[in-house]
Image (spheres, grey):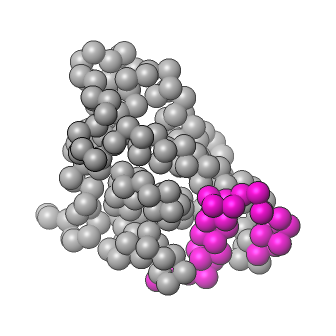
Amino acid sequence: MSHTPRYPLPDLNTLPDDLKAKILEVQEKAGFVPNVFLGLARRPAEWRAFFAYHDALMTPEAVGRHSGLSKGDREMIVTTTSAANHCLYCVVAHGAILRIYEKKPLVADQVAVNHRKADITPRQRAMLDFAMKVCLASNDIDDADFETLHAHGFDDEDAWDIAAITAFFGLSNRVANVTGMMPNPEFYLMGRVPKQK
């Protein structure tokens, strides 16, 4: 497969003002524009809906909602389930963010390959077991799965978050795979080595 996206990235200057402003804000913060922001911008209404739901799930505090999942937990769910969906973009991009939030340079690679052998807490392992079941066999979820989460301190709202993040990124994984979206080179080293002062 070619490493050129099937759908060329739009020119930033041709985008609606609200998309352009948000993308420039991300560029200012990250130092580059993650390809997903431009890749989805070819359809502005879908971009707005996608990032509204993304932000509601990944930064619930921004919409006034409490979550029992840490930022690292959320990125761990994305990295683990995106690996199961064979999404290179999301594994690399969210793996980078995971390494930074958890301050553990090995964790993203570990959970992407086999979360059961990763250096994570039993609580995180239970969370990822549930996420992987949602990812691969959601029709088999039953009360026992919720009871396992409860035993690790998660409530039903946390279970909803785990399921919704897994489901949302299942959509993202499929769009990224179909469009040939590639990770920005900057993501590969983020969180692996100490930041240069």
Seen in the image, is 142 located left or right of residue 19? right
The x and y percentages for residue 131 are 63, 63
Q: Residue at x 65, y 75 (%)?
A: 126
Foreground: 4 or 127? 4
Q: Residue at x 37, y 67 (%)?
A: 99
Please tell me whether residue 101 is drawn above or below residue 64 in the rendered image. Answer: below
Read off the magenta span: 119-148
Seen in the image, is 135 located left or right of residue 148? left
Foreground: 132 or 59? 132
The image quadrant that residue 124 belongs to is bottom right
Residue furthest to the right in view is 143
Residue 25 visible at all: no
Quadrant in the picture for the C terminus: bottom left
Q: Residue at x 24, y 18 (%)?
A: 13
The x and y percentages for residue 157 are 74, 55
Foreground: 135 or 56? 135
Seen in the image, is 39 located left or right of residue 158? left
Say if the magenta span includes residue 131. Answer: yes
